[in-house]
Amino acid sequence: MGKVAVGAAVVCAAAVCAAAALVVRHRMISSRKWTRSVAILKEFGEKCETPIGKLRQLADAMDVEMHAGLASEGGSKLSMLISYVDNLPTGSVTRFIFDL
């Protein structure tokens, strides 16, 4: 019985080692794919990066166009509709929902 137990233990140990090797291999492949994906995203972010100064110029230009559109009809490339809000929300509906 001792030789059978030792043989079974060796077979089990070999199976565990094989399974561990497969898990490690799978993780290495996944890690390579993840590293490659991160590199692609980093490159994309660097190529699409917009300087802060350029974004501020864009925001200022939109602000000017919006004010011109509100000041006169046809005074801007950006069409603006003058609208008014009669009643501001009080928050009572939100309070009612959370009180339930």
Image: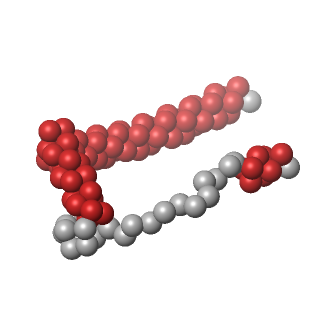
The single residue placed furthest to the front in the displayed view is 72
Q: Is residue 20 above or below residue 33?
A: above
On the question of residue 32 being in view, the answer is no
Judge by depth and name the residue closer to the eye, 20 or 64.
Answer: 64
Residue 88 appears left or right of 39: right
Q: Residue at x 41, y 44 (%)?
A: 26
Q: Residue at x 18, y 38 (%)?
A: 52
Residue 87 x, y percent position in the rendering: 61, 58
On the question of residue 13 being in view, the answer is yes
| Quadrant of the image containing the N terminus | top right
Residue 28 appears left or right of 98: left
Residue 77 appears left or right of 27: left
Q: Residue at x 60, y 54 (%)?
A: 88
Residue 17 x, y percent position in the rendering: 49, 34
Q: Count how many numbered circles sit on residues in the image.
A: 0
Judge by depth and name the residue closer to the eye, 100 or 92.
Answer: 92
Residue 54: name its quadrant. top left
Judge by depth and name the residue closer to the eye, 23 or 89.
Answer: 89
Looking at the picture, the colour scheme in use is secondary structure
Residue 55 x, y percent position in the rendering: 19, 45
Residue 78 x, y percent position in the rendering: 24, 67
Residue 15 appears left or right of 68: right
The single residue placed furthest to the bottom in the displayed view is 74
Judge by depth and name the residue closer to the eye, 65 or 51.
Answer: 65
